Amino acid sequence: MTSTDNSTGSAQQPAAEPARAAKDPWDLPDVSGLVVGVLGGTGDQGRGLAYRLARAGQKVIIGSRAAERARSAAGELGLGVEGADNAECARRSDIVIVAVPWDGHAKTLEALREELSGKLVVDCVNPLGFDKKGAYALKPEEGSAAEQAAALLPDSRVTAAFHHLSAVLLQDEAIEEIDTDVMVLGEARADTDIVQALAARIPGMRGVFAGRLRNAHQVESLVANLISVNRRYKAHAGLRVTDV
Ligand SMILES: NC(=O)c1ccc[n+]([C@@H]2O[C@H](COP(=O)([O-])OP(=O)(O)OC[C@H]3O[C@@H](n4cnc5c(N)ncnc54)[C@H](OP(=O)(O)O)[C@@H]3O)[C@@H](O)[C@H]2O)c1
């Protein structure tokens, strides 16, 4: 047995207190009626996610610092996607994906604290630096982008997911399935279940619970490795978690 094996062996239960059946981890809620907003949805990642979710039948609102840019991007996507400024996007959505660059992350979220209050926030931001050796992981003061989001948004339900996707594949209309798992992190099971279910709306994709936000740093950082893979193999690499 390895140190990553979480089984506790055959602990004896008192006869009077039968163990409760564990919840099936793949028993996920129906999220098809939830509105998904994408902050920074005019960019490659946000636009790609908006496209895939809308194509799967989800109601999507693209957000931007400029409403007109969002409306224009939404018009290009079709599929009932709407555009709005980031504040209106946050206000009108049940789930809000944060897809802005790391540079603008803190400032964007600070300004939307009220609009994001009570919302399920999904952070997909990878704090990365680039130099002549390639991509490398930055070390945010709070631990990770997701933990920075949680610190800035105390009244929101912050989760982290969708870090390892290729925006190129997401936006390629000829591709039917996105062959990857999505690592989902968060503090509340009800919230990570919703995000897993959202990922599963996209054909080929599966959401896998991957721990609490304190473990978001390595998930965000892994993108630096995937960028190295992509450069060497001229690929758009995804990720699969095996044996689950
Ligand atoms: N690209 C990928 O393959 C990929 C994959 C996984 C995760 N991610 C993560 O997703 C995020 C977005 O990536 P991207 O490639 O889509 O980035 P991007 O195109 O550079 O930026 C996305 C959008 O964010 C807005 N924006 C730009 N600078 C901003 C700032 N300083 N403050 C607030 N908003 C700003 C812009 O929209 P407006 O000007 O319309 O406001 C822009 O269209 C990043 O944090 C990245 O780590 C990207």
Image: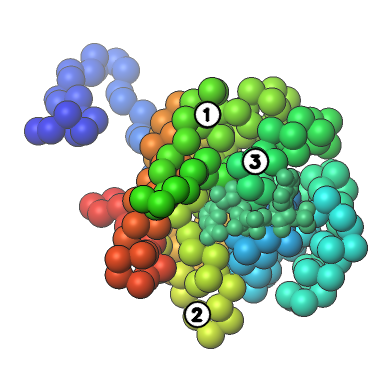
Asked if disc 3 is less than 8 Å from ligand 1, the answer is yes
Under tag 2, what secondary structure?
Answer: loop
Q: Residue furthest right?
A: 68
**Quadrant, the N terminus:** top left
Residue wearing tag 1: 140
Asked if disc 1 is less than 8 Å from ligand 1, the answer is no
* Residue 35 x %, y %: 74, 55
Q: Residue furthest bottom?
A: 174
Q: Tell me the tag on residue 176.
A: 2
Under tag 3, what secondary structure?
Answer: helix
Q: Residues within 10 Å of mark 2 (few under 14, many from 20)?
A: few
Q: 24 above or below 63?
A: above
- The residue at 41%/52% (across/down) is 132
Under tag 1, what secondary structure?
Answer: loop
- The residue at 81%/33% (across/down) is 111
In whole angstroms, how far apart are the C-alphas of marks 2 and 3?
Answer: 32 Å
Return the disc, 1 or 2, that comes first in the chain's sequence: 1
Q: Tell me the tag on residue 38.
A: none
Q: Is residue 126 left or right of residue 210?
A: right
**Residue 74 visible in the current orientation:** yes
Q: Residue furthest front?
A: 132
**Residue 29 visible in the current orientation:** no
Return the disc, 2 or 3, that comes first in the chain's sequence: 3
Q: Residues within 10 Å of mark 1 (few under 14, many from 20)?
A: some
Residue wearing tag 3: 103
* Residue 54 x %, y %: 68, 69
Asked if disc 2 is less than 8 Å from ligand 1, the answer is no
Q: Is residue 230 left or right of residue 158?
A: left
